[in-house]
Amino acid sequence: MTMRQIVLIDQEVRSEGARQVLPPTRRVAACAVIVNPFAGAAAVDDHALLVDLSFEVGALLTARVLKALDGLQPCGYGKAALVGTAGDLEHGAAMIHVRAGLAMRNGIARGLALIPGNAKVAAAGTAIDVIFGGIDDAWDYDAMDTMPVALPDAPRPNEIVFVVAFLAGGRPNARIKGAPQSQVTQWVRSLGGQHRSSPGTAA
């Protein structure tokens, strides 16, 4: 593995919507800029190398974020990948959708809910919104938030920016109340479709 840099972004939100945020919201993201071993090559179907890399780097980034939070208990988490233009969108998917979540859950010893993750192919300096979801409850509306992440010099065409992020304190001044999972499940079942699985189930 060749890693060019690690960047830590620590955002503390103290005011939102002309109201003071008490306690302040903390959004912390650790970003690793790594060389994409498949950049510039023909498309492959075996992405095991990136999957293994995601676990190794994910553990390192998770530790960096938790150290920055300094004992604050996160309520939300998210992950993302920006793939340089010589790469493939599936390279980003391999980084975020298979084993990265295990590294994050190991770090916090929690994590029943699916970890939101998104990836895109882009040039250096492009922003990506890291999507936060509740750690143990995907229907925790207060933990539904986003954090924009952008690095001016990354990803270069042969690189991937891999992002692990945690949210503490919830969305700033969160106060909306959405429908509970049970209500949505009942409504979906009333539609008469063929799919009966409950929404929000962790995978």
Image (cartoon, helix red, strand yellow):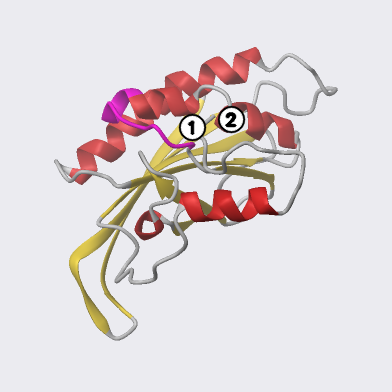
**Residue placed at 27% from the left, 45% from the top?**
74
**Residue beneath the point at 48% across and 27% down:** 100
Tell me the amino acid under the disc marked 1: Arg
Pick the residue in front: 93 or 56.
93
The residue depicted at 68 percent of the width and 29 percent of the height is 91
Within the magenta stretch, is there residue 121?
no
Q: Secondary structure at mark 1?
A: strand
> Which residue has dot 2 on it?
97
Residue neighbourhood size for the residue with mark 1, other residues' Cα within 10 Å, grouped as few (<14), some (14–19), many (≥20): few
- The quarter of the picture where residue 25 lies is bottom left
Residue beneath disc 1: 4
**Residue projecting furthest to the bottom:** 18
Q: Position of residue 89 (x, y in %)?
A: 73, 37
Magenta residues (range) = 106-114
Q: List x then y, in percent, for residue 143.
A: 37, 54
Per the model, the C-alpha gap separating discs 2 and 1 is: 23 Å
Image check: 58 left or right of 69? right
Element assignment for label 2: loop
Q: Main secondary structure of the magenta part?
A: loop
Q: Earlier in the sequence, mark 2 or mark 1?
A: 1
Mark 2: which amino acid? His
